[in-house]
Image (spheres, rainbow, N blue to C red):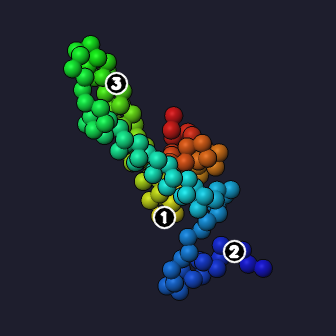
Amino acid sequence: MRAPGRAWQRGAQRGQERPRPTWERGVELETVRKRLLARREELARRASDTGADLRRENEPLSADFSEQVVQRENDDVLRGLGDAARGELVSINRALARIDAGEYLRCAACGAPIDPRRLDAVPYTDRCASCAH
């Protein structure tokens, strides 16, 4: 009996499109993709809400100066949260592209396999534990 991975390799050699593997080294790639897409949607919604709060769409700036100070401090926190969400969105989009390119399970720095436990904990990572430190 032939190994299941060989059929797609033979098809690719004959010019046929190679199907994307869904299960490799203990990682269910479609599950990871769904998880990343759900997180991306959540972060996009959060970034939108943060932007609306910073633009004062729901609550105008108070006329009371001491209250304005508190509101401005809150704005700084909101900006930080929005920046963090946008940064994570970039990482998620890169991870989705790496899945599509078949590079998700390999470290972008050294090419070594990324431990599935690390990918489970940080699904948008592109570094193995050694290169991340």
Residue beneath the point at 35% across and 31% down: 78
The image quadrant of residue 29 is bottom right
3 or 2: mark nearer the eye: 3
Q: Is mark 1 in CB contact (under 8 Å) with mark 2?
A: no
| Residue sitting nearer the eye, 121 or 7 | 121
| Residue position for label 2 | 4
Lower sequence index among marks 3 and 1:
3
| Distance (Cα) linking label 3 and label 1 | 39 Å
Residue topped by disc 3: 74
Residue 21 vertical position relative to residue 93 in the rendered view, above or below: below
- Badge 3 density bin: few <14, some 14–19, many ≥20, Cα 10 Å: some
Q: Which amino acid type corresponds to the residue marked 2 in the rendered image?
A: Pro
> What amino acid is labelled 3 in the image?
Asn
Residue contact at pointers 3 and 1, CB within 8 angstroms? no
Residue at image point 34% right, 24% down: 74
Tell me, for residue 100, which label it has, or none: 1
Eye-nearest disc, 1 or 2: 1
- Up-down: is 25 above or below 70? below
Q: Earlier in the sequence, mark 3 or mark 2?
A: 2
Q: Pick out the residue farthest to the top.
A: 66
x and y percent of residue 128 in the render? Answer: 55, 44
Which type of secondary structure does the marked residue at label 3 adopt? Answer: helix
Give the residue drawn at x 57%, y 40%.
129
Q: Is residue 37 left or right of residue 68?
A: right
